Image (tube, helix red, strand yellow):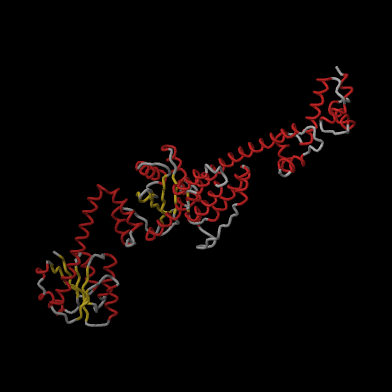
Amino acid sequence: MYKVLLVDDEKIIVEGISRTVNWNAYNTELIGTARHGLEALSMIERDMPDIVISDIKMPGMNGLQLVEKVYEKYPHISFILLSGFSEFDYARTAMQFGVKHYLLKPCNENSITEAMSEVIEELEKRHSQETFMHNMQKELSKVLPHAKEQFLKELVTNKTYGQRDWDDYGRLFRITIDNDKIRLLLFQLEGKFEFEHMFAIKNIAEDVLGQSIMLLSTTIGKHVLLLIKDTQETETESLFTQLKEIKNTFTSYYKLDATVAVSDAGQIIHARKMYRETLECLNYQFYLGEGSIITKKDIEHDEVGIVKPFIYDEEPICMHVKSGDWEYVGAELRNYFEMLADSRMDTHLSKSYVIPLYVSIVRQGKPDEINDYLKKIASFDQFHTLRTIEQFVTENAQQICLNNYQMQTKKHSCIIHKMIGIIKEHISNPDLSLNWVASEILYMNADYLGKLFKKETGEKFSNYVVKLRMEKAMEEIEKTGDVKVFELAERLGFGDNPQYFSQVFKKYTGFTPSEYKRSP
């Protein structure tokens, strides 16, 4: 039965309402009457009524003042206010303290009982809610961890959740934030992992951060989400140290790494916005790499929303791939991916720039292998970081460079082998020279052939020819003994200049041809 207190300075009003209202019919009991606000306040503190029916205009403490005093201490007590005045200001003031029922005098039994019925309905509804919350607390104590997890999921994903929801559930879960700010931490485990690994990182985080800091935790999809209190202990530098400890402990036990996104500090009502912020941070794992700790500062741009065009000339690197110059190609690829990382473009846009470069590079490979390299383009969908894409492109470019280098080396060896054959075949020709071989036989650039010959044999073309001629001269002298100098000169490409032949022979052997014949 609900207890009712009647307050009015007019005795006739008090007696009239007391007698005309059938209190029992409405499951109520009139516990007393008061003549003014001060007397009513004393009775309220002593008897604690559920409903107060009070006049507004009274001596000492009026009805509005009484409402204010009672609302401050006992907000659960409901009021029905009576007044002989129709000014709106009275009703507006009363509504500030939760008063919904405002009746004008003179009021009859029907208006009073109707208002009282509505108040009782509200009280019963409130009692029902309180009973429900009590029962819910009792039941949830058994499944409290799961309930907390589900609430955190709803808090960061449900648009309708606000401060009131947090207040209700905060009391339910006995979590106090007051005016403190909070942060969200979103963990993404790298590599192949099981659900137990997600459970493990939550436990490790709770140990490292402490229960007073880590308020709630849950899993959303493949992510682990933590809601922590933002205090002096969770300032960025200190928090980063703790996050590294969590990651290192987890890695040491499970041999897996984790990327962490950290939201800015904010009020609990902004949790949904902060969650979207951490998801955006994780997207930049593409540039910052797996295992990073990423904050909003890491993903901010100087000019928000403006994507600068990424311009790169592929021709130089393709030329060096073709020639097999890996030293140049490796350095240029490192430079290319550094520029791409600095651009901070959308992940898919970044891949759209890398794929054409990859295609251009593989086109420099062996014709029969190009299709195999092109089929690997499908692998780009599996790459979640710029670092893994860089490794993929670098490894394939290096293999193509190595193959091209070996092909070029083999090709060069064939050319040099052919040149040596030409030298031996035309050893007696006085016109034998690098320019003659290049223009008359091989139809190639003489400077290029000269450099190639020197690189392959270690000798200049002209020195090689002289050396071969002198070796053959010495061989002839040793074989026959009486060979004529002019014959040797003519036979070895010195034409009709035996004197020059002798000079060259002496310079090479230290003897003239005649002295060499007589030497033992």
Q: Is residue 240 visible?
A: no
Residue 275: quadrant of the picture: bottom left
Of 244 and 451, nearer the camera is 451
Q: Residue at x 9, y 68 (%)?
A: 24
Q: Is residue 255 visible?
A: yes
Classify the position of the N terminus by image quarter.
bottom left
Figure check: 448 above or below 481: below
The residue at the far top in this view is 520
Of 426 and 67, nearer the camera is 426
Of 478 and 326, nearer the camera is 478
Of 224 and 322, nearer the camera is 322
Residue 476: quadrant of the picture: top right
Is residue 327 toward the left or the right of residue 516 in the image? left
Figure check: 514 above or below 192: above
Q: In x, y percent, where is residue 327?
A: 63, 42
Q: How many marks?
A: 0
Is residue 81 toward the left or the right of residue 204 in the image? left
Q: Residue at x 24, y 79 (%)?
A: 57
Q: In x, y percent, where is residue 66?
A: 26, 72
Is residue 37 toward the left or the right of residue 176 in the image? left
Q: In x, y percent, where is residue 294?
A: 48, 51
Q: Residue at x 88, y 33 (%)?
A: 497
Q: In x, y percent, where is residue 334?
A: 58, 47
Classify the position of the C terminus by image quarter.
top right
